[in-house]
Amino acid sequence: MSADEAQDNHHDLSYREDIPRVRTREGVELYAETNGEGDITVTTLNNFFFSAPFWREYTEELVKHYRVLSYDLCNHGQSSRVEQEPTWEEHAEDLIGLLDGLGIESTYLIGTSASTQLARDVALAHPDRVRGMVLAGPVVGPQGMRRHRGLQRAWLRTLNSYGMPELYSHMYPEVISTDMNEETGTPGFLGLRESFLAMSTAEELNNGLTLAQQGDPSPELLTRIQTPTLIALGDDDILLGPTAGQELAELFPKGRLALMPKAGHVPFLDDPEGFQEIVRKFVDEVESDV
């Protein structure tokens, strides 16, 4: 992406008013939209920073081949607000309820950053509902999650001390790759900031970053997952290098690694087309083995 493209790049974050919310459990209805058609469904999982509409731009190729489901987590975006912040278990229950409500028997999951933990938990608790997982910029690690959670605590302190604009300034050089920082410069920084500030409130991010530090961090959990799993890792990811990425993939009985050259912690931001091609290849390979 050039600097000029970055300056003009404004994500369509509008919601579709004609879409009915889907009830997933008592008191919870989720905003969910599907694009594309087909027998195979690919479901995107938000990481507290993204909203459902954000995914449209990064699934434009996938919708030509699959049904793509994107939704807002409970207490985020246009989904229901409940007094008690949901747990990981409740977020997993919501996903299964969403699939039930839409008549989807099983799906591929795309998790990114914090939501890779949600994908892990769903695959453990409901293996029959997950055909495969793509974990992009995973926070689950081969030695545990201590480093990831330390970074999240630092982000949380910045948010609560200085607010969302400063949190964005803190996160951007860490999450966005070296190449994207250099190539898009200030226009890239400002273009993405507009979307970042529009997609969440400070309260939502506080709750999300707090939840991200909870849950079992044990790598041993990954050895129990029989779901085919692809680690999609930018080789400029601040949290996980290529060697650790390979070690992580090997923990999954059916794991594999796809390195994305010069991409950062959210690799589909660097190369949307390349990321979608990786997902397509993975899905096709898994389906050919069924």
Image: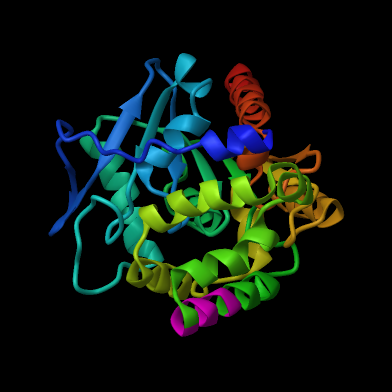
As drawn, is 145 to the left or to the right of 59?
A: right
Give me the residue at 22% from left, 34% from top. 16
Queried whether the magenta region covers residue 24, the answer comes back as no
Examine the structure image and report whether residue 159 is included in the region drawn in magenta: yes
Magenta stretch, main secondary structure, is: helix
Residue nearest the viewer, comparing 185 with 269: 185
| Horizontal and vertical percent position of residue 254 | 68, 40
Query: Quadrant where the N terminus lies?
Result: top right
Pick whichever, 83 or 173, lies toward us. 173
**In the image, farthest residue toward the right:** 243
Residue 44 in sight from this viewpoint: yes
The image shows residue 192 at horizontal and vertical percentages of 53, 49
Q: Residue at x 32, y 46 (%)?
A: 96
- Considering depth in this image, is 246 or 181 the residue closer to the camera? 181
Q: Is residue 134 found left or right of 254 in the rendered image?
A: left
State the scheme by which the image is colored. Answer: rainbow
Q: Is residue 206 left or right of residue 146?
A: left
Residues in magenta, as a range: 154-161
Residue 112 vs 70, above or below: the answer is: below
Tally of numbered discs? 0
Residue depicted at 41% across the width and 74% down the height: 206
Residue 270 in percent (x, y) is at 67, 39
Look at the image and tell me whether residue 26 can be seen.
Answer: no
What residue do we see at 40% from left, 15% from top? 38
**Residue 2 in picture, x, y percent from top left:** 68, 34
